[in-house]
Image: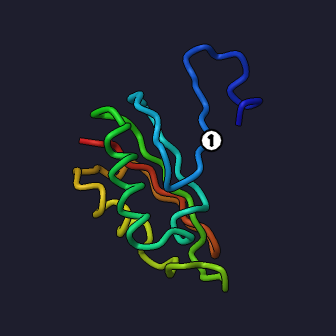
Amino acid sequence: VRRAVGADRHVRVRRLVLPGRFPAERYDAVVVAEVLYYLSPCALRQVARDVAAALRSGGRLVLAHHRVDYPDFVQHAAHIHARFLAATGVRWRGVGDTRTGRWRVQTYERR
């Protein structure tokens, strides 16, 4: 990701251990990929609240996850994005949805 954004001084990349201490800054975009189904329901709710608090009004949230279950998942992949969004406690507007046989990538705008 760092290589993709290059020297763009307006882009900051953070890699976090979740759940855990979330940065205090506010962001224009947050990407959550390949992690939600590994979290317990309690941890998912905490991460959802942290992401919502970190995202500016009008900011974009990208969720990218498998659509099929794997043995090491703590939660089922089906509806993981809906569970995450509901746990944020804020309103979202869907602005993109891409599906393949295995993947789903959804983009939302915070209202």
Q: Position of residue 92 (x, y in %)?
A: 28, 50
Q: Position of residue 61 (x, y in %)?
A: 43, 45
* Direction from residue 57 to residue 72 in the image, left or right: right
* Direction from residue 95 to residue 19 in the image, left or right: right
> Does 10 appear above or below 68?
above
In the orientation shown, which residue stands out farthest toward the bottom?
71
Q: Position of residue 38 (x, y in %)?
A: 57, 70
Q: What residue is at 67 percent from the left and 86 percent from the top?
A: 71
Q: Quadrant of the C terminus?
A: top left
Q: Position of residue 15 (x, y in %)?
A: 62, 41
> Does 45 appear above or below 26?
below
Residue denoted by label 1: 15
In the orientation shown, which residue stands out farthest toward the front?
21
In the orientation shown, which residue stands out farthest toward the right?
3
* Residue 83 vs residue 4, the one in the foreground: 83
Image-quadrant location for residue 86: bottom left
Q: What residue is at 30 percent from the left and 42 percent from the top?
A: 110
